[in-house]
Amino acid sequence: MKRLVSAAIALLAAQGAWAGDTAGLVGIMNTSGTVEVNNFVNPKVIWTVYNVNDPAEEAYVLAYVAYKKLGKHTPSIEWTDAQNKPVDRCKFDQTTVTKMPWVHTLTCKWGGRLPDGGIRFTVFNTFEGQKEKVGEMFIPPNTK
């Protein structure tokens, strides 16, 4: 299991390897929940699709953000539908980065009657009043 999680994080990091000036996305995934092992938050089961308009559909976005600058950072996760229309967002408390390296784990619960066409999760960081995109993930709908 540990190798599977490490491989998943490495794969996701490679897919979302671009980063902003103040933070970078180390990994992002859609999971059924989280478990903590040795003070590190891990996914339970990684999901790659969702069922459209299923009110029981519920999951978590788990993102690992590495900060590149000392100071106060405010991360957020926003999700949009296939037409880039906002669906919802998670805002997080401000984090004060006092040393490097600093990796922050973000967990955001989502679900309900989801739109058809897929859903995009975008991770942002606000530093010194400037909001920048850190990375994103797209999840296609289950069309069967």
Image (spheres, rainbow, N blue to C red):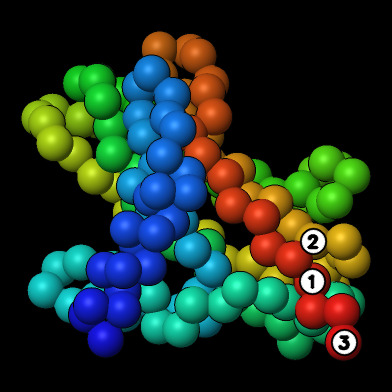
- Give how far apart the Cα atoms at labels 3 and 2 are: 14 Å
In the image, residue 144 above or below residue 81 = below
Q: Amino acid at mark 1?
A: Pro
Query: 83 or 4: nearer the eye?
Result: 4
Left or right: where 42 falls relative to 127: left
Q: Position of residue 120 (x, y in %)?
A: 70, 51
Instruction: Please say whether residue 89 is visible from this viewpoint.
Output: no
Query: 40 or 10: nearer the eye?
Result: 10
What residue would you read off at disc 2? 118
In the image, residue 46 above or below residue 124 = below
Residue 10, quarter of picture: bottom left
Residue 115, quarter of picture: bottom right
**Residue count near mark 2 (Cα–Cα under 10 Å), binned few <14, some 14–19, many ≥20:** some
Q: Secondary structure at mark 1?
A: strand
Q: Position of residue 91 (x, y in %)?
A: 54, 44
Left or right: where 107 falls relative to 6: right
Instruction: Please say whether residue 124 is visible from this viewpoint.
Output: yes
Q: Mark 2 or mark 1: name the one nearer the start of the chain.
A: 2
Residue pictured at 31% horizontal, 68% vertical: 7
Q: Amino acid at mark 3?
A: Lys
What residue would you read off at disc 3? 144
**Residue count near mark 3 (Cα–Cα under 10 Å), binned few <14, some 14–19, many ≥20:** few
Residue contact between numbered discs 2 and 1, judged by CB atoms under 8 Å: yes
**Residue count near mark 1 (Cα–Cα under 10 Å), binned few <14, some 14–19, many ≥20:** some
Q: Which mark is residue 141?
A: 1
Quadrant for the C terminus in the image? bottom right
